[in-house]
């Protein structure tokens, strides 16, 4: 049964792939977290780096304006917190006048998300270090690409602290922490940097996309959940996870955005995830680094350490550029390409190139599908050839089943003998399909996790390929002014999902299921309807891809079938001369 084998193969492949993507990574992370937590870092954790909480003075804090090519916002001079950043090139929705995407937001707002750098004392140290209430002095009013800014603060004990900040044309900040010691004795301090998030966001990616704390230390990726931080935080420091190593990066990721701190890559650091409860079900997530060795500043001297801060969109080419130019290890892993990244990432590279060439992500998707179909054409030929032979054998198989219906062992022996006699391998039709499924799965993953499809228009009414088709059959495609999806998500059925269902139905008609099992026949008849409603809530880019793929598959199968039919007489021709030989 051709369709039966197809559905079984698809289901088994999906189970295997989802198992690798979802279950195994979770198990791996748990073991790694236990191993890392068992050997805590000797340095203070970033989560406890600043004990002083901000004090409400009743007056607005002084701020340093930020204005670069792709971002604008401000830095809070009280505490030197980078906590106000908006992306100039990304809007929240495709609607005209939609607000720009905000990636950093001050404390006290709806979704606080910020970045801090600073110093902590060594054990027994008494140096007055800047904290959350320190008011810094800036040497310029605005931070731009052409104009870096230096923040300064004198602790009154002989030490002057400085933070130099520069920004490039995208989303990367360069940070220099400097201590000038005018005192009579050497001082030792631990530099730190961290990302703080004081709310728990709604995770939109499901098991397909990691959202939450993320880090790469010693080329080892760790992806933890918000829940694991809340459950694993251990007082008094409330550290949920820690790992020591050299360099790396760490932060908090959303589906499309990333806030991350990147220490000096030749420095020994302790990376930590922490959770500070603030009452009720609220708390603060901290992800960052603290130096393992203190920064020693000699009397009359100074000492400097450098780091970077990334706050912006997870554009794969940009992340790869930073990885190369700043030597940030595996920075591209901020995009969750999954366990099959060895295949998923190259597929995205081809898609991104096609998008650049064609100027439309939907057209790039269609062009890529054509390339895949051409690449797998020999396998598809073999598959359809095997399916054709199996279809021709159905009457004989049905007869054997009726004859040996009470003797399963004899039936199996006769079936094997029939396959051997006809030179047919029933599994050969599934093997080519199984080889293609990982490619299509990785394509699905790429379309779901990368920002390039977000708000990418197609043609007609599709203005966002990452969102579902906005048309709806149950409003007569806009003639009835109501939103039935508020009653049930099932009442959202656009034109492209309907087109997908029709192509799936046509594909099944091209490969009819044998009527030997009426119950199974009826189940397959309902499959196009079930899948149509399922795809109605999926990103329209995925629906267009599957619809286009179904059309290409039918065209490919028709072409192969015609070739097979044209070749059939040539195969049977040698049998004709043997007919007169029987008249001896």
Image (cartoon, helix red, strand yellow):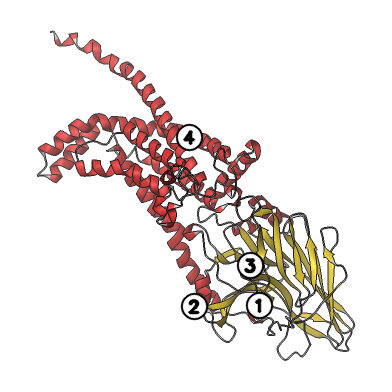
Label 4: few (<14), some or many (≥20) within 10 Å?
some
- Does 160 sit left or right of 436 as displayed? right
Q: Count residues near mark 1 (Cα–Cα under 10 Å), then give few for <14, some for 14-19, many for 20+.
A: many
Q: Give the Cα separation between the discs numbered 2 and 4.
A: 47 Å
Task: Kindly identify the residue that appears in the image at 35 percent across and 50 percent down.
Answer: 12
Q: Is residue 407 above or below residue 579?
A: below
Among the two numbered marks 1 and 2 on one chain, the one whose residue lies closer to the N terminus: 1
The quadrant of the rendering that contains the N terminus is: top left
Mark sitting earlier along the chain (4/1): 1
Q: Secondary structure at mark 2?
A: helix
**Residue 558 at what x, y percent from top left?**
39, 27
- Contact check, label 4 and label 1, Cβ < 8 Å: no
Q: How many marks?
A: 4
Q: Dividing the picture into quarters, in which one does residue 433 lie?
A: top left
Disc 1: which residue: 46
Task: Indicate left or right for 422 with 254 as reference.
Answer: left
Q: Are marks 2 and 4 in contact (CB under 8 Å)?
A: no
Q: Mark 3 to mark 2: distance in Å?
A: 20 Å
**C-alpha separation, residue under disc 1 versus residue under disc 2:** 18 Å
Q: Name the secondary structure under disc 4.
A: helix
Residue 248 showing in the rendered view: no
Q: In front here: 558 or 464? A: 464
Query: Residue 124, percent across and down?
Result: 72, 91
The residue labelled by disc 2 is 231
Q: Is residue 341 visible?
A: yes
Badge 4 is on which residue? Answer: 373
Among numbered discs 3 and 2, the one appearing first in the sequence: 2
Q: CA distance from mark 1 to mark 3?
A: 12 Å
Q: Is residue 178 above or below residue 503?
A: below
């Amino acid at each position: 049964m051709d369709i039966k084998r197809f559905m079984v193969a698809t289901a088994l492949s999906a189970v295997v792939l989802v198992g690798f993507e979802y279950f195994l990574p979770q198990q791996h992370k748990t073991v790694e977290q236990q191993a890392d937590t068992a050997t805590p870092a000797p340095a203070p954790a970033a989560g406890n780096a600043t004990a002083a909480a901000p004090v409400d003075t009743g007056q607005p804090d002084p701020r340093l304006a930020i204005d670069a090519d792709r971002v604008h916002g401000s830095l809070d001079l009280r505490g030197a917190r980078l906590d106000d950043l908006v992306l100039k090139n990304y809007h929240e929705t495709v609607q005209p006048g939609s607000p720009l995407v905000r990636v950093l937001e001050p404390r006290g707002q709806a979704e606080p998300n910020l970045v801090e750098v600073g110093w902590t004392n060594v054990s027994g140290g008494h140096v007055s270090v800047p904290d959350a209430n320190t008011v810094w002095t800036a040497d310029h009013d605005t931070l731009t690409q052409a104009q870096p800014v230096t923040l300064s603060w004198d602790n009154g004990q002989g030490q002057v602290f400085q933070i130099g900040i520069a920004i490039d044309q995208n989303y990367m900040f360069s940070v220099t922490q400097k201590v000038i010691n005018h005192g009579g004795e050497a001082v030792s301090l631990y530099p730190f940097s961290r990302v703080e998030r004081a709310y728990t966001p709604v995770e939109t990616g499901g098991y397909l996309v990691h959202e939450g704390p993320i880090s790469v230390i010693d080329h080892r990726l760790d992806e933890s959940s918000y829940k694991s931080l809340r459950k694993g935080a251990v007082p008094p420091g409330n550290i949920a996870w820690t790992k020591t190593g050299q360099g790396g990066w760490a932060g908090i990721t959303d589906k499309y955005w990333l806030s991350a701190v990147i220490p000096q890559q030749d420095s020994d650091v302790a990376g930590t995830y922490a959770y500070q409860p603030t009452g009720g079900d609220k708390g603060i997530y901290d992800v960052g680094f603290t130096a393992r060795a203190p920064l020693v500043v000699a009397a009359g001297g100074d000492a400097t350490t450098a780091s970077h801060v990334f706050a912006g969109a997870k554009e794969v080419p940009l992340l790869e550029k930073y990885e190369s130019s700043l030597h940030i290890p595996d920075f591209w892993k901020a995009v969750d390409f999954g366990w099959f990244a060895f295949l998923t990432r190259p597929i995205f590279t081809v898609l991104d190139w096609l998008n650049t060439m064609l100027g439309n992500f939907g057209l790039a998707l269609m062009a890529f599908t054509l390339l895949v179909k051409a690449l797998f054409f020999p396998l598809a030929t073999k598959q359809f050839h095997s399916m054709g032979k199996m279809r021709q054998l159905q009457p004989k198989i049905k007869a054997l089943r009726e004859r040996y219906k009470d003797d399963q062992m004899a039936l199996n022996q006769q079936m094997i003998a029939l396959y051997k006699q006809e030179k047919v391998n029933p599994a050969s039709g599934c093997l080519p399909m199984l080889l293609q499924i990982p490619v299509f799965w990785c394509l699905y993953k790429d379309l779901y996790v990368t920002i390039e499809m977000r708000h990418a228009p197609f043609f007609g009414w599709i203005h966002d390929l990452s969102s579902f088709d906005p048309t709806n059959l149950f409003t007569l495609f806009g003639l009835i002014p109501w939103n039935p999806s508020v009653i049930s998500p099932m009442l959202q059925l656009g034109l492209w999902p309907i087109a997908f269902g029709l192509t799936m139905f046509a594909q099944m008609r091209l490969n009819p299921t044998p009527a030997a099992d009426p119950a199974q026949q009826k189940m397959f008849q309902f499959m196009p309807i079930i899948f149509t409603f399922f795809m109605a809530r999926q990103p329209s880019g995925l629906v267009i891809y599957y619809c286009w793929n179904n059309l290409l598959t039918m065209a490919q199968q028709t072409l192969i079938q015609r070739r097979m039919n044209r070749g059939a007489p040539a195969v049977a021709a040698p049998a004709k001369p043997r007919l007169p030989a029987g008249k001896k």
